[in-house]
Image: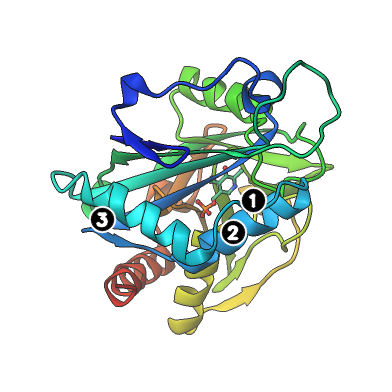
Amino acid sequence: MVYLNGKYIEKDKAFVSVMDRGFLFGDSVYEVIPVYKGNIFCIKPHLDRLGESLKAINIPNPHTFEQWNAILQQLIDYHPQYNNQSIYLQVTRGCDTDRKHTYDKLKPTVYVQSSPFEVVRKEDFLKGVSAITRDDIRWSQCNTKVTSLLANIMYAQEAKQNNVEDVILCRDNIVTECSSSNIFIVKNGCVYTHPKGPHILPGITREVVLECANYCGINIEEVPTSKEDLFDADEVWVSSSTREVLPITKIDDVLINQGQAGELWSLVYDRFQVEKSLNV
Ligand code: PMP
């Protein structure tokens, strides 16, 4: 079942108009929210970020927190067979009568779907995963979670063709984030990550990872790091709602930590699992 504009319907019966600005222009924003055993993880930060994204592109938020929560809960309850769920939520500016760049007041289109998702077990992460580096060609409002994701799609396809997990993006030799996750570089016991701002998505998992690192007594620096720092790192991690926190152990054929997940990653991963169980 999916949710579309107030109704729960079968996915193959859910349609939007060709005049929807989400279809015509990618004029819309989205969220991806993990649900562990029926409990929505970090619902408030996710809905707050949705509110920020809507505000940034001047779409009125169609629902209050309580209404969003009720919509998501009901959709989750339709899928008791899923152990964990990944909620995809999209709000478009709505449908117009003709295609034009400018817009007047429209009724936003709201679409929500749920898919099953499995958490990768720690033992399957011990060798880590690979990544490649590319120039960050995206626009300069990466902090707004818009559905215009062409650059990210091209990176994802390149990752697939290169048989790697993700693409690490560098803007003017500064490591920003990955095409679908945030990145952390560990050196001499300190974890470095790009500061929030227009060049990265303020990942909800990024915040949880920083809280976990802090809990584990690891120093944190939210400062830009260079591509050289990346290859010189003791450990590299990436985070996202569907991947949690995972170690990158090979970048452009260069091994990180001799191709093994690091000790600090292990501490943070374990703490992350505790945070998940507390956040219910
Ligand atoms: N950066 C980018 C570019 C992303 O697409 C994502 C995941 N959507 C993230 C970071 C991670 O964000 P979150 O932790 O909120 O899933």
Q: Nearer the viewer, mark 2 or mark 3?
A: 3
Mark toward the start of the polypeptide (2 vs 3): 3
Which residue occupies the foreground of this view, 103 or 134? 103
- Where disc 2 sits, the SS reads strand
Whether pointer 2 and pointer 3 mark residues with C-beta atoms closer than 8 Å, the reply is no
Mark toward the start of the polypeptide (1 vs 3): 3
Quarter that holds the C terminus: bottom left
Which residue occupies the foreground of this view, 259 or 143? 143
Residue type marked 2:
Ile
Please state if 239 lies on the left or on the right of 79 as rendered: right
- Where disc 1 sits, the SS reads helix
Whether pointer 1 and pointer 2 mark residues with C-beta atoms closer than 8 Å, the reply is yes
Q: Nearer the viewer, mark 1 or mark 3?
A: 3
Residue type marked 1:
Leu
Looking at the rendered structure, which numbered label has been put on residue 230?
1
Quickly name the residue at label 3: 122
Horizontal and vertical percent position of residue 34: 37, 53
Quickly name the residue at label 2: 185
The tally of labels here is 3
Task: Using the image, determine if residue 173 lies above or below residue 194.
Answer: above
In three-dimensional space, the C-alpha distance between marks 1 and 2, rounded to whole angstroms, equals 6 Å
Q: Residues within 10 Å of mark 3 (few under 14, many from 20)?
A: some
The residue at the point 68 percent across, 19 percent down is: 24
In three-dimensional space, the C-alpha distance between marks 1 and 3, rounded to whole angstroms, equals 23 Å
Task: Using the image, determine if residue 180 lies above or below residue 222.
Answer: above
